[in-house]
Amino acid sequence: MTNNNMYFIANWKMFGKLSSINSINKVIKLSKSNEFSKTKIIYCPPYTLLKDFVQKTKKTKISIGAQDCHYENNYGPFTGSINAKQIKNTGANYTIVGHSEKRSAGDTNIIVNKKVICSLREKLNVILCIGETLKEKQKGMTTKIINKQLEICLKNIKDLKKVIIAYEPVWSIGTGKVLKVEDLNVILKKIKIFLKKKYKIKNPKVLYGGSVNSKNILILNKANEINGFLIGSASQKENIFVDILKKSIN
Ligand code: PGA
């Protein structure tokens, strides 16, 4: 894959303070170069920094997203939560939903489905994370699990134009382990076939996430079906993220 139209989503998780905003300067500069004119770079900082990131990237093509949203769209007594309306109100345009770190804290496929609906209602683009655990992989259940996640998380959603799928095997997140590129390609293809058949969309966007770094990007990027990457820890270190972006250009 060349990186034309590729997505690079930086998931900062629970990292970053106000001064961290200066650590995206090199990425901003890179995003303005011709080589990256079609590359979609999206920063997902913690909620506390959303507005600052929106401000900082105002005159650039970089987009900003949240890492989650509440499953209710109305304002209400949900201490500690943020809804899609509030995210949109910061100027962000994306939200991640269904991340395995939220699923392991209680988000079921049904809850994730509500979050997708709320986000789309607020005209946010959705990055829907799916992926199997190590146990499920060992039992040969990968396809069954991801099909079920897609089926339930996307229930009653008619227009998938604003939905991007991020395939993130749970056993790969933060572990340094990644799939063989051939295996990755097979799974990406299966996800696309499922989406094309069920939702009749022509060009589904499917990304990979889990331990992406400046070394394995060269190999992972060889997967023909890949449309981009969701990157956690490596996206928080500016030089590494820049390296990943540069290496993704063939
Ligand atoms: P990682 O995280 O790149 O640090 O493995 C990916 C993610 O959780 O989205």
Image: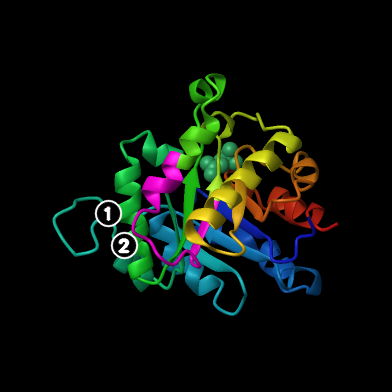
Residue found at the far left of this picture: 77
Q: Which residue is mark 1?
A: 71
Amino acid type at circle 1 is Tyr
Amino acid type at circle 2 is Cys
Q: Locate residue 97 relative to residue 192 in the image: left or right.
A: left
Q: Dot 2, how many residues are within 10 Å of its Cα: few (below 14), some (14-19), or many (20+)?
A: many
Q: Which element is circle 2 on? A: helix
Contact between labelled residues 2 and 1, with CB atoms less than 8 Å apart: yes
Tell me if residue 236 is in the magenta stretch: no
* Image quarter in which the N terminus is found: bottom right
Q: Locate residue 55 relative to residue 119 in the image: left or right.
A: right
Spatial separation of the CA atoms under disc 1 and disc 2: 7 Å
Is disc 2's CB within 8 Å of ligand 1? no
Q: Which residue is mark 2?
A: 118
Query: Which residues are the magenta region?
Result: 148-165
Q: Which one is in front, 59 or 207?
A: 207
* Image quarter in which the C terminus is found: bottom right
Q: Is residue 62 above or below residue 210?
A: below
Of the two numbered discs 1 and 2 on the same chain, state the one appearing first in sequence: 1
Identified at 74% across, 43% down, the residue is 220
**Which disc is residue 170 wearing?**
none
Q: Position of residue 139 (x, y in %)?
A: 52, 19
Q: Position of residue 183 (x, y in %)?
A: 70, 34
Q: Locate residue 1 relative to residue 197 in the image: left or right.
A: right
Query: How many numbered discs sit on the rendered protein?
Result: 2
Identified at 33% across, 69% down, the residue is 121
